[in-house]
Image (cartoon, rainbow, N blue to C red):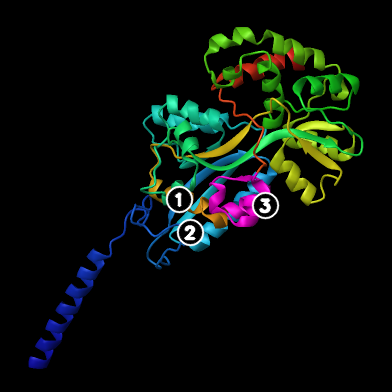
Amino acid sequence: MLRNKARVLFMIALSLTFGVLSACGGGASSGTSQGSGSDAKPASDNKSAPATASAKPAEFSFYFTGSQNVKDLWDTLIPMFEKATPDVKVKPVYVPSGTGAQPTYDRILAAKQAGKGSGDIDLYEDGVNYVTRGQKDDLWDTLGTDKIPNLAKVDQKIMKDVANLAVPYRSSAVILAYNGDKVKDAPTTLDELYDWIRKHPGKFAYNDPSTGGSGDSFVTTAIYKFLPEDAIHNSDPAIEKQWDQGFALLKDLGKYVYGKGIYPKKNQGTLDLLASGEVDMIPAWSDMVLDQINKGQLPKSTKMAQLKPGFNGGPTYLMVPKLSANKDAVAKFLNFILTPEAQSVIVTKMSGFPGIQLANMPQEVQDKFKDAAAGFRTFNIGDLGKDISKRWQSEVAAQ
């Protein structure tokens, strides 16, 4: 009898012990994660305790757009992050370049207006125009070193320019790419470029500006050639009255470009023409050119040059919707992306400029990019880019 009573008391005590342990070990929901505050371990280590069998990893959706090299980059970085941070899983959603990133932005905005959070989009990649649009629509979360310590490695002037609403994780610039075997004296100014196009009919191409940034840069640069320098930071629609001279230039050039007015789709479309020898010169993103030379997709004779004044360039940004339910998990990912390890992948895989300051990178990377970013300009004209594209389609492409 006493033995049975002792056994019962032992079982009760054991049950209470497990109950206390279970209560202490209760985890946060899948939309949150711990360790991303100001006292978190620096992301250069970026190690998390392995997820237990009963703890489901936090998951967030990441929408990004671009050419194939952008997809290849994330296909490399996301597994690296998930291996280092097993308590977070990334759900990538790739929107191919030329299919339009606008619907993704519209979805985030529509979800907010309908009171439905962020539309299940937790992280969004795009250019500065979408940063500023989201600022007006109050879409983006303000980011800081309290949850993303490695933001301290980013140029704080760039962060100030976007009011800390986005992470500039890599940079690139539009340049002239040309066949060095056929073009011995490449243009160095915009006027020289336009003169070269007229003197070499059919040997220059730029892509439809609505399908890729290099074509968009060529068009925008031509339009703003005739405006004051500070106009490239003006988003006031009143400035559209000053676009006529630039559009007249683009219409005139139309009969001299490839196919007397054929505009390939996407950034890759013009690169393919250069690779095949159908044209001798194009505007292109520097990272795409370097990457494809390294892979043998462009001939070794391919050269690059920046003009004066230069085409546009600058960072590509990652933005966190303010209404995302998974911001802590996203913060861990952003912290990883800003580590020298992840940034080195960007440099080697995309030939992109690092998003963090060069002083934080290995010496060989510092030497490679010391002068590489010089010459380009950063255009920030807000929603005016949509009006440029519409007018280009009706006045230039349709002629």
Cβ atoms at labels 2 and 1 below 8 Å apart: yes
Residue 162 in view in this figure: no
Marks 2 and 1, how far apart at CA = 8 Å
Q: Is the Cβ of the residue at disc 2 closer than 8 Å to that at disc 3? A: no
333 and 106: which one is in front?
A: 333
Magenta stretch in the rendered image: 343-370
- Of the 4 image quadrants, the one containing the C terminus is top right
Amino acid at the residue labelled 2: Ser
User: Relative to residue 388, is residue 117 depicted above or below?
Assistant: below
Query: Which mark, residue 349?
Result: 3
Q: Assess whether mark 1 and mark 3 are in contact (beta carbons under 8 angstroms).
A: no
Of callouts 2 and 1, the N-terminal one: 2
Quadrant location, the N terminus: bottom left
- The secondary structure type at the circle numbered 3 is helix
Left/right of residue 112 with respect to residue 6 in the rendered view: right
The CA distance from mark 2 to mark 3 is 20 Å
Q: Which residue is mark 1?
A: 150
Mark 1 residue crowding within 10 angstroms, few (<14) / some (14–19) / many (20+): many
Q: In the rendered structure, does residue 365 fall within the stretch colored magenta?
A: yes
- The numbered mark, 3 or 1, whose residue comes first in the sequence reads 1
Residue hosting label 2: 44
